[in-house]
Image (spheres, rainbow, N blue to C red):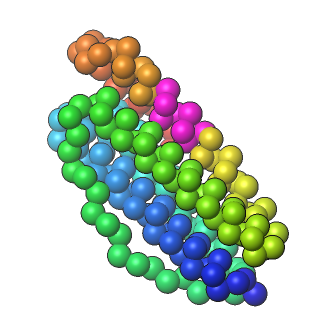
Amino acid sequence: MINAAMVKELNAQINAELYSAYLYLAMAAWFEADNWPGFAHWMKVQAKEEQEHAMKIYEYVNDRGGRVVLDAIEAPASKWKDAHAAFEAVLKHERHVTSLIHKLVAVADKLKDTATSIFLQWFVNEQVEEEKNADELVQILARIKGSPNGLFMLDRQLGKRED
């Protein structure tokens, strides 16, 4: 049976992952409203990944005999200055999620919950990839500097992201 304090923290992480999905859906809607289908597609794929992360934790809590308790999801922002600002927000958010995952690892270690520590290593590795992907796009958008041609090329590239 999993420790109740660990379950509470994992439930909070489920909420954080679902908020991430909600945030990326809001970004997708914003990009779609401005007719950037590739950027919107990238965000929808990202939202789907975040939902999968939430479900991975959900299933783990149930598998360990804990009780999943869902809380309200905070409303995300609905507009950004431009694509560069949106992806800067993505990077900032992913860094925040990384800090949450590291906190979970610390709690698991403090509770001597080896199973949860091992489970969380997948998320630690995933966050390295998430931050890298967001940072690359922030850097590309900084180089483009709002160039319409550059934005159209990047939009086309992001539209090819696989689900």
User: Which residue is depicted at the point 49% across and 31% down?
Assistant: 135
Name the residue: 42% across, 56% down.
20
Residue 131 among those drawn in magenta: yes
Q: What residue is drawn where x is 49% and y is 26%?
A: 136
The residue at 67%/51% (across/down) is 124
The region drawn magenta spans 129-136
Locate the N terminus by quadrant.
bottom right
Q: Position of residue 89 (x, y in %)?
A: 36, 41
Relative horizontal placement of residue 3, taking residue 14 as reference (left or right) = right
Farthest residue, direction left: 33
Depth check, front residue: 159 or 17 = 17
Image-based side of 70 in relation to 64, left or right: left
**Above or below, 71 relative to 31:** below
**Pick the front one: 49 or 65:** 65
Residue 37 shows in this picture: no
33 or 100: which is nearer to us? 100
In the image: residue 48, left or right of residue 74: right
